[in-house]
Amino acid sequence: MADGSTKTTLVQRVHETLMESLDEGVLRPGQRIKAAELAKRLGVSRAPVREALHILAGQGLVELLPDKGAIMRELSLADLIQIYEVTGPIAKVGVTAAARRIGEGDNRQRVEEAIARIRAARDAPPSYKFYLVLNDFHYLLNEIGQKPYVDYLLGLLNLEYWNRFLAGTIDMRLHIPGYIANYNRMADAVLAGDARTAAAVMDSHVEWSIDLLERTGQSRR
């Protein structure tokens, strides 16, 4: 590109712009993505935007359909549950690694500050942004545990998009206290340097989350 940006950076910019469009109500899941409008918004030509959309299609964020081009992928309840089933074991790698390195440098303080931000998020208006605070907690644990590939794999699953579907599926006002309780337990185990308990808490949280989604689905039938 003329400004020296890398392909990876453009894909990130397209991803961020799609998320912004969703939040603004300009774009909805299942709606066609107009590459020309997206390119204009980003100030680039259509070709690199189309290439970025193909990459995001490979990551499951968008779908490429004959005669329709790219559309935002819709996630079903089964999709939401399956992503939990996949992300849980991946995130557990970072959780356990952080517990083993908690005594190094200022790691303890950083985890304490991160869990404080999760507790504070209880008072904010319920939205997908609560999940972003949880994501930040895991990204911090991955950094502490020196597990960059965990970040990479979680990124491929487009957690921010998944978060928006989660927020629209469950009653967040009712269930945020449950999330906070789970993450308090997780943080306590990490701060204690207890990798085994931290792993067990992560497994328990995933089971709790899947059960919550399944009960939500049953109540809507």
Image (cartoon, helix red, strand yellow):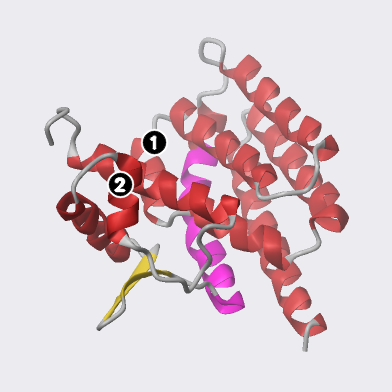
Q: Which residue is depicted at the point 23% across and 62% down?
A: 54
Residue 77 falls inside the magenta stretch: yes
Marks 2/1: CA distance? 37 Å
Which residue is the site of mark 2?
Answer: 40
Q: Which mark is residue 147?
A: 1
Quarter of the figure with residue 168: bottom right
Q: Which mark is residue 131?
A: none
* Type of secondary structure dominating the magenta stretch: helix
Numbered disc in front, either 2 or 1: 2
> Is 121 situated left or right of 106 in this image?
right
Q: Which residue is depicted at the point 80% across and 50% down?
A: 176
Q: Residues within 10 Å of mark 1 (few under 14, many from 20)?
A: some
Q: 142 or 121, which is in the foreground?
A: 121
Q: Secondary structure at mark 2?
A: helix
Q: Which residue is depicted at the point 34% across and 48% down?
A: 14
Residue range (magenta): 76-96
Q: Amino acid at mark 1?
A: Lys
Q: Residues within 10 Å of mark 2 (few under 14, many from 20)?
A: few
Residue 26 against residue 102 in the figure, above or below: below
